[in-house]
Image (cartoon, coloured by chain):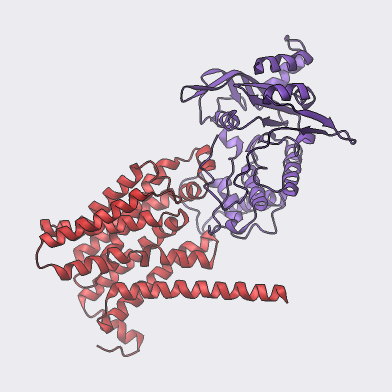
Chain colours: A purple, B red
Amino acid sequence: MSLRQGERAVGGDSPPPARPPDAAIRLRGAAVRLRGAAVRLGGRTVWSGVDLTVGAGEFVALLGPNGAGKSTLVKVLLGLLPLTAGEISVLGARPGRGNHRVGYLPQRRSFDAALRIRGVDVVRLGLDGDRWGVPLPAFLAPRARRRAAEDRIAEVIDLVGATAYAARPIGALSGGEQQRLLIAQALVRRPDLLLLDEPLDSLDLPNQSAVAALVARICRSERVSVVMVAHDVNPILGYLDRVAYLAHGGAATGTPEEVITGATLSRLYDTPIEVLRTSDGRLVVVGQPEAPARHTDRHGGDPRGDTR
Amino acid sequence: MTPSWNLVADLRDLWSYPFMVNAFRAGTIVAVLAGAMGWFMVLRRQSFAGHTLAVVGFPGAAGATLLGVAATFGYFAFCVAAALVIAALPFGAGGHGQESAVTGTVQAFALACGFLFVALYKGFLSGMNTMLFGSFLGVTTTQVVVLLVIAAAALAVLTLIGRPLLFASIDPDVAAARGVPVRALSVVFLVLLGCAAAEASQITGTLLVFALLVMPAATAQALTANPRWSLPLTIVIGLAATWLGLGVSYYTSGPLGFYVTTFAFGGYAITRLAGLARFAGLTARGAA
């Protein structure tokens, strides 16, 4: 039993292989395109034969059990890891080339409670943190440019609803507040593609749905393509244009209606999973193996210790 | 010697001796460099690495004296070499509290080596005190020039890498994705920190380097979380502690390292107590 079957099952519902011209046009403008992609790490094939297309302005979820290589795929999209086989283009170029047009939110970052840097400074680093030198004193900096930078930072902080606490030290903020500011940091340069690695992890339920709604709103209003890695599909299910499930060394991709079915998910996770439809038409996945509880305390453990 | 409590007259009195002028020059250079490096070190949680670099200066200085070379060169050679070693350790450059027991082991061994060099160089006990706890006596003009040249070079490099270094310190994953050379910056910073530790050792002694490396930065960062203010404030606090320490040490003939450390510690303690009092006040008001 493999994901190839899952893919075929999904493919069975989709259009025939000869793509109509409008699909070709849509693909040329695609934010991400993977064809037959494979990655090996330490002699082990993490996944292979992965096909994934993220259209401009689409909200795509990357789902799958622990260790399936979701974060690995994000690193490939950033150009930090090479493919061992297949084709890839990110924003029409080789991955890593256009990273100034990519906003990135790494997995499970939390700031030390004693870190004395304001939220607004963390957002600002997203804007110009990679420029050499130091910021000029205010009276020496070109006025127009300084004003433009400050306006953009204020605008993006307002967009994520963090204006009230952006001037407080980031270590003193809650996990949800930090996550909003980090999303603002990823957005501040008006990226065309947003890569979010488990942004809902370690948030409580109300914050999970609030941040999911925020990302969906940004995806529509800023016309940015979003790839979000997630453990639990339920908080984002209502917003998704497309999902990609990674498991057993391969991937199944398609629209939520195609992929999120009891049969496909049960096969992917090797465990019985049901997909229910609520009275208001929303899909709910039941029986999905829960991620082991960990790092719920944002001050506990080393945030960089566990990277997959 | 008693102060007249007339600031101008006292300063004229202090500076009538060339060795005091040199001590003030050296102290000023060291306070500025140590403040700037210490500000980043505290943000990067690399205080333990900083302390190890400073302690390694002790066998450096003792070894140089044993060989008949100026102690200044011993400080710089050992501190910079130790910085490169820590950077080469797999966890060293990562910083952020991942410094391991290895760093501590090296630190203890360095202290022991220093003591061995002192023992080999007989009749040298006052020299050991100076190396461990600092002194303002006998700062030569050549030494001041060496301190100035190295501090200027280190600050120039820090100015060049300042913003990406801050990015890499706070947010290494995103910085790496943006093309910031996180690992290389970490190595460069450790070398700069080695220079700062070597310079500060020559004023406060290797054991009290934290008076200039950690305390001003910790105080300034407790006062404000805005980097535009806390970095200059760090340098101002370091300068104040150094100048006050030098003045009081001159008039009381007391140990310089003690006074510089005490003024820096006093500033830190007052800041933290004021912060606690304000927090308690806010809580009380919130409860009322």
Residue extending furthest left?
B122
Of residues A225 and A208, the one nearer the viewer is: A208
The image quadrant where one finds the N terminus of chain A is: top right
Of residues A231 and A183, the one nearer the viewer is: A231
Q: Locate residue B214, reporting x and y percent.
A: 40, 63
Task: Report whether B285 appears left or right of B50.
Answer: right
Task: Report whether B245 appears left or right of A96.
Answer: left
In this picture, is A273 found above or below B180?
Answer: above
Of residues B57 and B149, the one nearer the viewer is: B57
Q: Locate residue A142, reporting x and y percent.
A: 55, 53
Q: Locate residue A272, reporting x and y percent.
A: 74, 26
Residue A205 in view (yes/no)? yes
Residue B282 position by quadrant: bottom right
Task: Report whether B192 appears left or right of B62.
Answer: right
In this picture, is A140 found above or below A268?
Answer: below
What residue appears at the point 24 percent right and 61 percent down from the top-left corner?
B145
The image quadrant where one finds the C terminus of chain A is: top right
Task: Report whether B1 appears left or right of A65.
Answer: left
